[in-house]
Amino acid sequence: MKAKKISKLLIANRGEIALRVMRSAREMGIRTVAVYSEADRSAPFVRFADEAVCIGPAPSKESYLVIDKLVKVCKDLKVDAVHPGYGFLSENGDFSRALEKAGVTFVGPSPEAMKVMGDKLAAKEAVKKFGVPLVPGTEGAVSGLDEAIAVAKTIKFPILIKAAAGGGGKGMRVVEKESELKEGLERAISEATNAFGDGSVFIEKYVAGPRHIEVQVMADTHGNTCYLFERECSVQRRHQKVVEEAPSAVLTPEMRKRMGEAAVAVAKSVDYVGAGTVEFLLDEGGDFYFMEMNTRLQVEHPVTEMITGLDLVKVQIRVAEGEKLPFKQEDLKINGHAIEVRVYAEDPMNNFLPDIGRLTTYRPPQGPGVRVDDGFEEGMDIPIHYDPMIAKLITHGATREEAINRMERAIDDYAITGVETTLPFCRFAMGHPAFRSGRYDTHFVRDHFKPELLEALGPEEAMAGALVAAELNRLRERPASGPEAAGARASAWKLRRR
Ligand code: MV4
């Protein structure tokens, strides 16, 4: 990667992350280019950008994922660099190679690093030489049933079969005992073939009740790599994170240092450049194991920003310009505690079924220690074509308890009607003794959550308060009439979209 000052940045993404990246670029005096689909024509990120180009119809396959269209916009508008955000083309080596060929800087790691980390087996192979702890299991892909039986006998059941091309929980299968191994293996291979076009699978010892702890790393092109501490992401359902916090409530300073140094070793194993995240599983005994590395800025990066005081997007951009990291490991300190909850247009009362519709009321919370990263405004429709995340709500406090109390206050202040959201679930999680105590693992939702509990919790009063406030504001702005004004008085948890 040749160092080059960035004057104009294209953001190959949409929604809250496009806006979040542009805000940092603007503060750096960098001009921003938005690309958008027809469905996003009136989105805030399009208005915020200095220039904006429509790149096609709503489906991402015809817009946000079309490499040639993006490269053409870069050339036409003389763009210096592209920030890919997360999702879409953020971990696509073909995209970064096409940009490089066009003389455009990709804000991210090399295509080679993305490729190794995109293949779970290649990733394990690469990090092993660097002394990073791995879950016991097969060295490479499983050759057949005989090997699977032999390995399972050595590491003992239960075992987990994983797809090499998988990741984020896709293509995993637990096998409890030998009699289930043959069928489990066959199904895992066939699922992996169908889902990824690659039937390679490997076996690991199944870690029961693990915590998902990931370490943020940042590396420059001069050989400096630092860890920016951990995020705990164990509150998730179907491999979709719902609550994240930093730092973890359970790591001791010694564990933090060991995990951080292991994450740096993972990054160094692929000459990593830029922002990356190294995922570990932490077992009940306090041992941790490398799982995978995500070669992008992640959704939950704000909690790391809140506790380190850094703007990760700015650091990414400086690194892409060829500058050195503006800090050394010993400069980095944890300040307080941060929590993020993801506000999805999903109904927690109804198995988190995605909900679409119009945001008839949308009033995000404010006040001390509250940050909202969103890409919507009141009156906008939630598009059906993309991820149903409406916003990320982040709170920061001097202590974990203050961050949690602040989150409860902020959730109660958040007024959304028109669609069901995950806010009631998040409110439930904040108040749950398992979460409050910090003693929770990746089974939190399965073990502790039932939709009925949202009723029992009685958050209606709190939400009603926020709605009354929102409604009063609305009355001041324009006379209350029509279905919107009437609807906003109903319970928000239950309010059906109109
Ligand atoms: C595991 C595991 C137990 N044992 N590996 C899921 C996502 C991927 N990053 C790794 N995952 C897991 N790997 C072994 N050997 C349990 C999980 C897992 C999980 C991990 C993190 C967060 C949530 C999870 C939910 C279910 C399973």
Image (cartoon, helix red, strand yellow):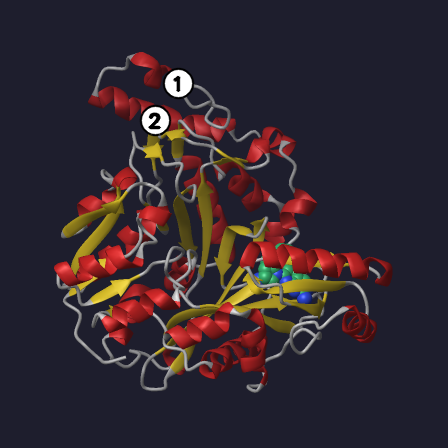
Mark 1 closeness class: few <14, some 14–19, many ≥20 residues within 10 Å: some
Q: Amino acid under label 2?
A: Thr
Horizontal arrangement in the rendering, residue 178 relative to residue 393 (left or right): right
Compare residues 111 and 156 and report the one nearer the observer.
111
Compare residues 362 and 73 and report the one nearer the observer.
73
Q: Amino acid under label 1?
A: Gly
* Residue at x-position 20% and y-position 72%: 103
Compare residues 37 and 224 and report the one nearer the observer.
37
Mark 1 falls on what kind of element?
Answer: helix
Calculate the distance from the C-alpha at mark 1 to the C-alpha at mark 2. 9 Å
Q: Quadrant of residue 90?
A: bottom left
Q: Position of residue 132 (x, y in %)?
A: 58, 81
Q: Quadrant of residue 253?
A: bottom right
Q: Does residue 452 sit above or below 295 in this rendering?
A: above
Q: Where is residue 301 in the image (x, y as percent from the top left)?
A: 40, 60
CB atoms of marks 1 and 2 within 8 Å = yes
Mark 2 falls on what kind of element?
Answer: loop
Q: Can residue 317 be seen in this view?
A: no
Horizontal arrangement in the rendering, residue 51 relative to residue 435 (left or right): left
For residue 487, the mark is 1
* Residue position for label 2: 360
Horizontal arrangement in the rendering, residue 390 relative to residue 12 (left or right): right
